[in-house]
Image (cartoon, rainbow, N blue to C red):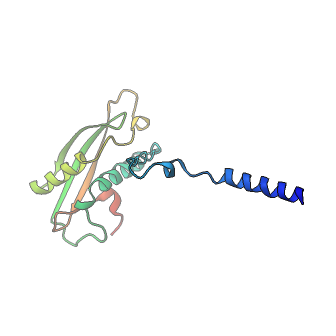
Amino acid sequence: MKQLLTVLAATTLLAACQQAPEPHARASAGAPAVPPAPKAIAPAATIDAYKLQVAQQIMDANTQFTFSGRLPSMLPAIVVLDLSVGRDGTLKSVRVHRSRDSDASSVALAAVRRVPGAFPPAAQLMRSRDKTLDFSETFLFNDQYRFQLRTLSGPQ
């Protein structure tokens, strides 16, 4: 009987040790919550993969200005922006390459500038003498001036 009590006590002790609360559960109710660390983005192996990462960052930073689903048969505005990104992912420049609508151009430029922080590092896609990775992105607008990015819109 004494052995059984010893085994039960040891089992209870081990179980208690294994169920320690998570560090964030120990924080008091009045303590400010620590925001989660940003997800690490794996370096892109191709320009197309890099453009997908950048397009997703732009969309994530502009959810209130975007639309999803099928594109309208007649797009009221199309804006093509030229982006230049440094080796470390910092936006070096953005300019309108093509547009016939100044309001849509302003929305597209603001959308790129609204992205918090830097884009993914681009050094692995650049030649050693290049200072920037240059590419374009096309903004496709509906009649409410919400946009989709051509890189993410897929075949329609």
Whole-percent x and y of residue 81?
A: 22, 48
- Residue 83 figure quarter: top left
Whole-percent x and y of residue 11?
A: 77, 56
Q: Residue furthest top?
A: 129
54 over 63 or under it: above or below: above
Residue name at image x 44 percent, y 49 percent: 28
Residue name at image x 83 percent, y 58 percent: 5
16 or 69: nearer the viewer: 16
Instruction: Indicate the quadrant containing the C terminus: top left, top right, bottom left or bottom right.
Output: bottom left
120 over 79 or under it: above or below: above
Locate residue 99 relative to residue 128 in the image: left or right: left
Whole-percent x and y of residue 73?
A: 22, 73
Instruction: Indicate the quadrant containing the N terminus: top left, top right, bottom left or bottom right.
Output: bottom right
149 or 23: nearer the viewer: 23
Locate residue 15 relative to residue 62 in the image: left or right: right
Locate residue 2 relative to residue 131 in the image: left or right: right
Whole-percent x and y of residue 68?
A: 30, 67
16 over 95 or under it: above or below: below
Residue name at image x 30 percent, y 56 percent: 59
